């Protein structure tokens, strides 16, 4: 039984992360870029927060710069028409996904006329979903918590007057905690809890080409990061938190996906700037999940997964109101990695539409502020656990999801 609980909980780590193309992949790394729904983010360089999307843009920032920001993420998810086939129960669930804050920070310094260095701190993955312990789909997931942090040392080089090149090293930390309900014929209702974390490396390469003072394009590639989570599994009686067995060391291999981004920015006139963005997220790298004992490296399970690569499109515009104020707006379409046959209660995700707006205020030549607001509408998502092949009673439901994002940042030029 210990082995079954371990496999059930660890198997859902992958399900949780794979859905993050929309639900757990946090694009919210720049309040300025958020105001345009991240349209033109790979070609943008309004401040150094854009270096997360394209390190080559650091060459547009002379001297020393710092940026601090964060986004308050307020999701809303509701499960309706929930039906448990085994017990013939119906019970809707409110407030499945919980709010969180995604901070970001960056610093850059100009070494000489051609070389610039920087350091970024970002939270590219993270979310909390939580159901009642006794809900109808407890055997498919109760609590899911993912946190991450990525430190990125970067360097940018101005190869010519028009072409800049950038590179960075992703130092990525990932931590997951999951609980799953299991009904045992003798022990009754139990919960399995899994916690694990990992620190691993990836890289990024980027370029920016400026045709003239008004038009530029950007291209960026972030590699996948291959994680080996190490952690423990505990089994306890539901509602008590009292462990029934000792913890057992386990590990699982998984990757956060590679991403290819392309952006363009064009200043139409003194007032208007137009931009567009395309991103391909390679979630198909999560084809397999390998689970092993840490003690002897014996294979517990090799699971074949079928997630798809996703696309993100965005268009936006900025309007220079006066010498101090700039207005931003944007529209985006964000494709989910999850098809119906792979959807689980942990990730009630679907394709999304983004509606964004924001303001930039230039206090003086050194200090600027950005605020942004985004409303994300998610298409209705149907769940039928019989299609996923996961163990547990068949549960069906219809999920309605939406997210509000409130971003803010400060940028200072020395």
Image (cartoon, grey):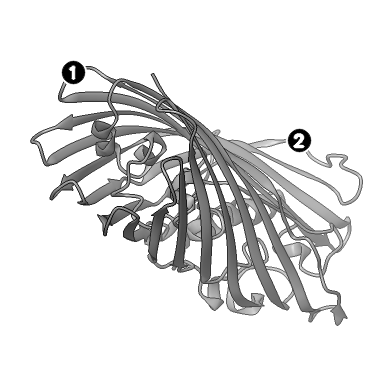
Residue 331 in the image: state x and y as whole percent. Answer: 46, 66
In depth, the one of 154 and 93 nearer the eye is: 154
Asked if 151 appears above or below 28 in the picture, the reply is above
Q: Mark 2 falls on what kind of element?
A: loop
Q: Quadrant of the C terminus?
A: top left
Asked if 70 appears above or below 19 in the picture, the reply is above
Residue lying at 62% horizontally and 76% vertically, measured from the top left? 381
* Discs 1/2, front: 1
In depth, the one of 83 and 29 nearer the eye is: 29
The reply to whether dot 1 and dot 2 touch (C-beta < 8 Å) is no
Residue 300 visible in image: no
Callout 2 crowding tier (Cα within 10 Å): few <14, some 14–19, many ≥20: few
Q: Which residue is mark 2?
A: 246
Residue 288 visible in image: yes
Residue 179 in the image: state x and y as whole percent. Answer: 73, 50
Mark identifier at residue 112: 1
Asked if 204 appears above or below 96 in the picture, the reply is above
**Dividing the picture into quarters, in which one does residue 392 lie?**
bottom right
Q: Is residue 344 left or right of residue 64?
A: right
Residue 226 in the image: state x and y as whole percent. Answer: 39, 42
In depth, the one of 115 and 96 nearer the eye is: 115
Q: Which residue is farthest right?
A: 240
Callout 1 crowding tier (Cα within 10 Å): few <14, some 14–19, many ≥20: few
Q: Mark 1 falls on what kind of element?
A: loop
Residue lying at 37% horizontally and 57% vertically, measured from the top left? 285
CA gap, disc 1 and disc 2? 58 Å
Q: How many marks?
A: 2
Residue 349 in the image: state x and y as whole percent. Answer: 59, 67
**Dividing the picture into quarters, in which one does residue 137 lie?**
bottom right
Q: Earlier in the sequence, mark 1 or mark 2?
A: 1
Mark identifier at residue 270: none
Residue lying at 72% horizontally and 78% vertically, measured from the top left? 397
């Amino acid at each position: 039984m210990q082995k079954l609980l371990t496999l059930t909980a660890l198997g859902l780590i992958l399900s949780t992360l794979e859905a993050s193309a929309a639900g757990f992949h946090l694009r919210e790394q720049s309040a300025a870029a958020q105001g345009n729904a991240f349209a033109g983010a790979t070609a943008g360089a309004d401040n150094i927060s854009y270096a997360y999307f394209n390190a080559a843009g650091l060459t547009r920032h002379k001297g020393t710069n710092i940026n601090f920001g964060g986004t308050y993420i307020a999701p809303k998810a509701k499960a309706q028409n929930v039906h448990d086939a085994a017990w013939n129960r119906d019970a809707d669930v409110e407030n499945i996904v919980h709010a969180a804050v995604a901070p970001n920070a960056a610093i850059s310094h100009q070494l000489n006329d051609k070389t610039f260095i920087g350091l970024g701190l970002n939270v590219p993955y993270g979310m909390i979903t939580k159901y009642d312990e006794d809900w109808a789909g407890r055997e498919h997931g109760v609590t899911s918590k993912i946190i991450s942090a990525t430190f990125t040392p970067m360097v940018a080089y101005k190869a010519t007057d028009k072409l800049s090149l950038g590179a960075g090293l992703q130092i990525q930390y990932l931590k997951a905690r999951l609980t799953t309900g299991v009904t045992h014929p003798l022990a009754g209702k139990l919960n399995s809890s899994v916690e694990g974390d990992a620190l691993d490396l990836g890289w990024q390469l980027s370029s920016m080409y400026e045709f003239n003072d008004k038009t530029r394009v950007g291209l960026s590639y972030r590699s996948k990061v291959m994680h080996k989570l190490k952690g423990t599994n505990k089994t306890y009686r539901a509602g008590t938190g009292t462990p029934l067995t000792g913890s057992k060391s386990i590990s699982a291999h998984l990757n956060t996906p590679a991403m290819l981004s392309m952006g363009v920015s064009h200043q139409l006139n003194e007032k208007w700037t137009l931009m567009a963005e395309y991103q391909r997220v390679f979630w198909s790298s999560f084809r397999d999940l390998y689970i092993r004992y840490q003690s002897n490296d014996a294979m517990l399970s090799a699971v074949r997964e079928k997630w798809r690569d996703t696309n993100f499109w965005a268009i936006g515009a900025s309007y220079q109101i006066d010498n101090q104020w700039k207005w931003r707006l944007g529209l985006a379409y964000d494709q989910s990695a999850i098809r119906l046959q792979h959807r689980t209660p942990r990730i009630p995700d679907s394709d999304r539409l983004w509606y964004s707006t924001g303001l930039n205020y230039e206090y003086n030549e050194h200090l600027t502020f950005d605020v942004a607001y985004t409303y994300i509408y998610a298409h209705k998502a149907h769940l039928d656990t019989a299609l996923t092949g996961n163990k547990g009673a068949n549960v069906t439901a219809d999920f309605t999801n939406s997210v509000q994002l409130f971003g803010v940042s400060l940028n200072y030029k020395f």
